[in-house]
Amino acid sequence: MVVKLYFVTGNEHKLLEAREVLKPYGFLVERLRARKLEIQSDSLVEIVKVAVQSLGDVGVPVFVEDAGLFIGALNGFPGPYSAYVYRTIGVSGILKLMEGVENRSAYFESAVALRMPNGEVEVFVERVKGFISTEARGTGGFGFDPIFIPEGHTRTFAEMSLHEKNTLSHRAKALRSMAEWLKRKLRAIS
Amino acid sequence: MVVKLYFVTGNEHKLLEAREVLKPYGFLVERLRARKLEIQSDSLVEIVKVAVQSLGDVGVPVFVEDAGLFIGALNGFPGPYSAYVYRTIGVSGILKLMEGVENRSAYFESAVALRMPNGEVEVFVERVKGFISTEARGTGGFGFDPIFIPEGHTRTFAEMSLHEKNTLSHRAKALRSMAEWLKRKLRAIS
């Protein structure tokens, strides 16, 4: 049985990642073009909860995702505003802020909010710990991937294939949490 | 006749500025503690419009204000997320990003949204042009005031008295626009 899940996102990369991660579970990801409400908050969980609820009743299982890069030495910056920071000061801005900074610990966090046709909302949050590199490396991925090295690795996310990034990443982990939850749910009702 | 206006803000400095600016017009500013919806947007106008509308009908004239520092060489960063950026990387972060940058042009923008008891919403936007200093100077004001020198001046906002800043600032100008609009409105209905 193939179950369709609808992903509200404007980000092509996230769509591809989600399709690859969710396929083995038998979930087919379709993009839903809808306007979601995006609030300002330090909490990604709050942002995605409000976003998925703002979609109202769409009659199908629908999910949204938001992610951020949280750098310890910068008090969590750029955090929930990573997309805006990427568009303005970019990778080079982050590298400049980190010049001469010894503590390079950071983590990526992803929050996925799923809204079931009955209105039930479930949120899945996952992190991947790592370090900010001293230079941008690689051409894969998107956003701050070229400067993030996951713990236990030597290459940045941008130096990995989509498949390899998906074995490690915050977003892949959050999406898998959603998939496991959905599978339990579907078993319970079938 | 004294008219009371209600300002929804968590920022003590903004409250003091608004009181000083609006007093000569015969407007008394009271703080209203209410939860407003703050969306993510590159447009301060959109942010304050949604915020004031989210308050619903409070039966009195109520306003909200949002401001940002837009730095040309940083593609407008930190812009609408200035408060978050101030809390994380702070003044020193901005100075580090601007190290060796020749073009130091920037502007502060303020957007004020007023909601009248009849539901009418009016937005006032003003800017003050200036430059990013090479070091933080002064102890007045708040936020990025210590690194902003308004055009035609040599001192930063933080080196000025509240009264002097209020003769120049983006926020004072937007508040005065609101006051003028309100005075015309009140004359028309009295």
Image (cartoon, coloured by chain):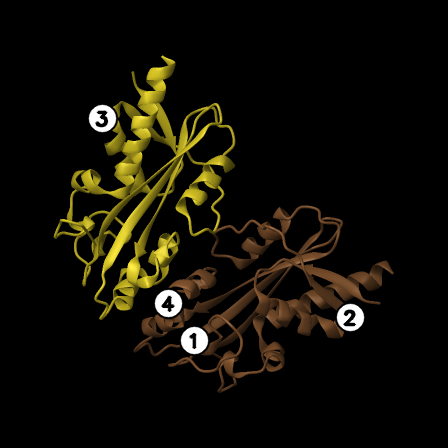
Chain colours: A yellow, B brown
Label ID, residue B105: 1
Please tell me how crowded label 3 is: few (under 14), some (14-19), or many (20+) other residues with Cα within 10 Å: few
Secondary structure at badge 1 equals: strand
Q: Position of residue A96 (x, y in %)?
A: 27, 68
Q: Position of residue A73 (x, y in %)?
A: 29, 63
Indicate which label's residue lies in the foreground, 1 or 2.
Answer: 2
Question: The residue marked by circle 2 belongs to what chain?
Answer: B
Give the labeled residue for mark 2: B26
Give the labeled residue for mark 3: A24
The residue lying toward the viewer, choosing from B3 and A16, is B3
Question: The residue marked by circle 4 belongs to what chain?
Answer: B
Q: Are marks 1 and 4 on the same chain?
A: yes
Q: Do we see residue B150 in this rendering?
A: no
Label ID, residue B74: 4
The residue positioned 26% from the left and 38% from the top of the image is: A172
| Residue type marked 2 | Gly
The residue positioned 54% from the left and 54% from the top of the image is: B47
